[in-house]
Amino acid sequence: MLRTSQVALKPRFAAVRVGTAAMASAAIAALSTATLRRQVHTSYRAQPVVSSPAMVQPIGNHRNATTVASAVDTTTLKPLPAKILIANRGEIACRIIRTCRRLGISTVAVFSEADAASQHVKLADEAYCIGPAASAESYLRQDKILDVAQRTGATMIHPGYGFLSENAAFAKLLEETQNVTFMGPPSTAIDAMGSKSASKEIMLAAGVPCVPGYHGADQDPTLLASEADKIGYPVLIKAVKGGGGKGMKIADSPEEFADALSSAQREALKSFGDATVLIEKYLTAPRHVEVQVFADQHGNAVYISERDCSVQRRHQKIIEEAPAPHLPEELRRELGEKAVAAAKAVGYVGAGTVEFILDAERPENFYFMEMNTRLQVEHPVTEMVSGLDLVEWQLEVAAGNRLPLLQDELKIEGHAFEARIYAENTDAGFLPDTGKLVHVALPSTTTTTHSNVGSVGQGGAEAVVRVDTGFVSGDEISVHYDPMIAKLIVKGRDRTEALRIMANALNQYQVVGPMTNIQFLKDLVRHPKFVQGEVETGFIGKFGKDLFKWCGQRMDQ
């Protein structure tokens, strides 16, 4: 496979790939204008989404769609791109490809040598190897990705999540490129929200409440300890450029502060190249509630429901739901309005998520935590309850069109859950596992393995089960990347029904090969406190004795 900054065209479904540098160079030299034109694959037929009120309803062809806001003049809509490049892998790449296929948009995949046989490579219209397995030599190589886009005629790059999705330098690079658009917010917005300390100052100025704390530049340990004393213990020490729980430590007392600070700074420096931290009041029973926002290039911004992501392991989400349970409608509206204010404060464009932390005892006390300047892993639960295709919205906004719907035209119906299926050993502190997926059996109600939805009646009611995945039987879970196998998403008329559907779907989900967290998820969705919606970020630690009872099984999952 190629290890240079250039790539060679790989015909779709090709059985033989370039194996030497000489062959690769020859293939590059052979590229011509005709070779790089959009390819039309007559063997492919788009799979239409079955029409059902309870399912995700695609907007479809905007020029004929009845769901387009009446305020939008469809005669002046700008065309969607003919071809986009997806700078990602796994389930999110497959999910983006599905929407593009439905809309008639050609897709270009990039892949590392370790991903040569991956599903996103097989699904895309074109695919190019951009380097070895290490992300730094492939999925993070901005020069290679841009080179592929320009050579293939892709006019937009969708970053997915992770990798380059929140990289302000990459967004700026594309802003300075005349013929390739970044499908995300402006680099200035990514920069503004990339620093936890700077973003909190912006939010306070915009009237968005923030957790009491110290966000200053002075990092003298004595000063930080003094600030922690003023805030009051317990305190949370967080890397200003952190994410995914890295560089985050809790100190319950002054005696624990020095060690916690050193640990957080070391981890922050190793993970993000910046040891700067902030100190905040730690809420002992917090809920993690986030709001999906969308903004266009014309100054319009909306919020599309909130999601509860409180149940986490190692500060990372494993199950999400929408709408968040037990919140008054007034509070939902206030969260949404504050999220929109946050987006407007940084000139945001595209899909984003504003995360809040709520006091579980008094949820009206909520504070801004951070903004994720990308499409979230858990966006399908919002799609389920809103009936929208958020990737399609991203395409419309990136093309320069106005938001398809206005705030008062957005409707939320039913309740949805998303469970993340990981290859991991739950008994060993959720350590990642790897290996070949010898056998994978999806819930019988699912019509496809790649991000479409299926409808099934349950007791006369309409229910939905959806699986977003980038793996099938025979694929390998690599040590090089995140071990998430799939996302299992369900919808019911209410929370009780949705939980029942999720439990049933988990019972049907089978994975033979690496260890998974499926049994853990089964126990989680049946736990009395979870069933009652009494969730908080410390849920797993508090009820671990119940949740780990049957974990660690390989075959019966």
Image (cartoon, rainbow, N blue to C red):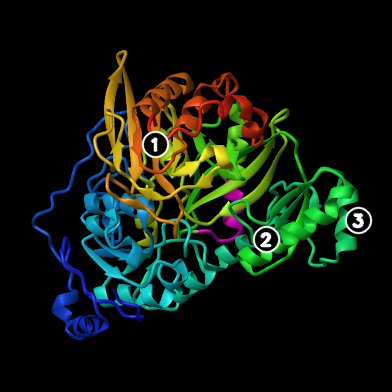
Q: Which residue is mark 2?
A: 267
Relative to 141, 456 lies left or right:
left
Q: Position of residue 217 (x, y in %)?
A: 79, 67
Asked whether the residues under the numbered discs 3 and 2 touch, taking CB atoms below 8 Å apart as contact, a structural biologist would say: no
Q: Secondary structure at mark 3?
A: helix
> Is residue 75 rendered to the left or right of residue 401?
left
Type of the residue with mark 1: Leu
Alpha carbons under labels 3 and 1: distance apart: 46 Å
Q: Is residue 493 above or below residue 256?
A: above
Residue 4 location, quadrant: bottom left
- In the visual, does 268 lie left or right of 181? right
Mark nearer the N terminus (3 vs 1): 3
Task: Identify the image quadrant of the N terminus.
Answer: bottom left
Range covered by the magenta-colored residues: 339-348
Queried whether the magenta region covers residue 344, the answer comes back as yes
Question: In the picture, which quadrant includes the C terminus?
Answer: top left
Residue depth check, mark 1 versus mark 2: number of the one nearer the observer: 2
Question: Few, some or many C-alpha atoms within 10 Å of disc 2 (few <14, some 14-19, many ≥20)?
Answer: many
In whole angstroms, how far apart are the C-alphas of marks 3 and 2?
22 Å
Residue 171 point in image, percent of width and height: 47, 69
Residue identifier under label 3: 226
Question: Disc 1 and disc 2: Cα gap in Å?
Answer: 32 Å
Q: Secondary structure at mark 2?
A: helix
Mark in the foreground, 3 or 2: 2
- Where's residue 478, x and y in %? 40, 56
361, above or below 18, in the image: above
For residue 362, say whether it is visible: yes
Q: Earlier in the sequence, mark 1 or mark 2?
A: 2
User: Which residue is denoted by mark 1 in the rendering?
Assistant: 488
- Residue 179 location, x and y as percent? 34, 76
Image quadrant where residue 345 sits: bottom right
| N-term mark: 3 or 2 | 3
